[in-house]
Image (cartoon, rainbow, N blue to C red):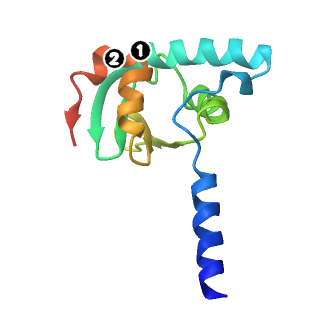
Amino acid sequence: MRILTVLVCFVSTLAAEAPFACNLKAFQPEERKQWRKLIEEMSSAVVEARELPDGYALHVDSRRTSLVKLSEWAVLERKCCPFFDFELVLHGEDGSLWLNLRGRDGVKQFIREDFTLLRDRLGTARVN
């Protein structure tokens, strides 16, 4: 009985991991338009990128986009790419806004290859 239980847990763990692929069919037509608008705005507002062990920290100019819009983008992005972990950080002292985009093994490479609007910033990312 113990072996069966372990096997069931192992199989269910494997099935829970989403593939590294954007599923743009997850969007309704209006959501996709909004997602595109938000990702372009967010990408143009990134002023710095720092490499993390499991992703990237993106410093976002809060004069170009808001915490609310970043949150809205993260909710939409999660629909098509459920393998990302999102962290929005708003620092009190200096008011800086950071989006940490992280995940399991392979996510960082996926970000480098798929986030073409950020490619120039990711290429010069400082290792944190």
Instruction: Residue 114 in the image: state x and y as whole percent.
Output: 44, 22
Q: Residue furthest bottom?
A: 1
Q: Quadrant of the C terminus?
A: top left
* Of 14 and 36, the residue lying toward us: 14
Residue with the mark numbered 1: 116
On screen, residue 41 versus residue 34, left or right, reads left
* Location of residue 116 (image quadrant): top left
Label pair 2/1, CB-CB below 8 angstroms: yes
User: Relative to 52, does residue 60 appear above or below in the rendering?
Assistant: above
Instruction: Residue 23 in the image: state x and y as whole percent.
Output: 64, 27
Residue plotted at (29% across, 19% down): 121
Q: Quadrant of the N terminus?
A: bottom right
Residue type highlighted by circle 1 = Thr
Instruction: Residue 70 in the image: state x and y as whole percent.
Output: 56, 29
Classify mark 2: helix, strand or loop.
Answer: helix
Residue plotted at (57% across, 49% down): 17
Residue plotted at (29% across, 24% down): 122
User: Relative to 18, does residue 119 appear above or below in the rendering?
Assistant: above
User: Relative to 113, does residue 37 appear above or below in the rendering?
Assistant: above
Q: Which mark is residue 72?
A: none
Q: Residues within 10 Å of mark 2 (few under 14, many from 20)?
A: some
Instruction: Residue 46 in the image: state x and y as whole percent.
Output: 38, 21
Residue with the mark numbered 2: 119
Q: Residues within 10 Å of mark 1 (few under 14, many from 20)?
A: few
Classify mark 1: helix, strand or loop.
Answer: helix
Residue plotted at (67% across, 34% down): 79
Q: CA distance from mark 2 to mark 1?
A: 5 Å
Residue type highlighted by circle 2 = Arg
* Location of residue 48 (image quadrant): top left
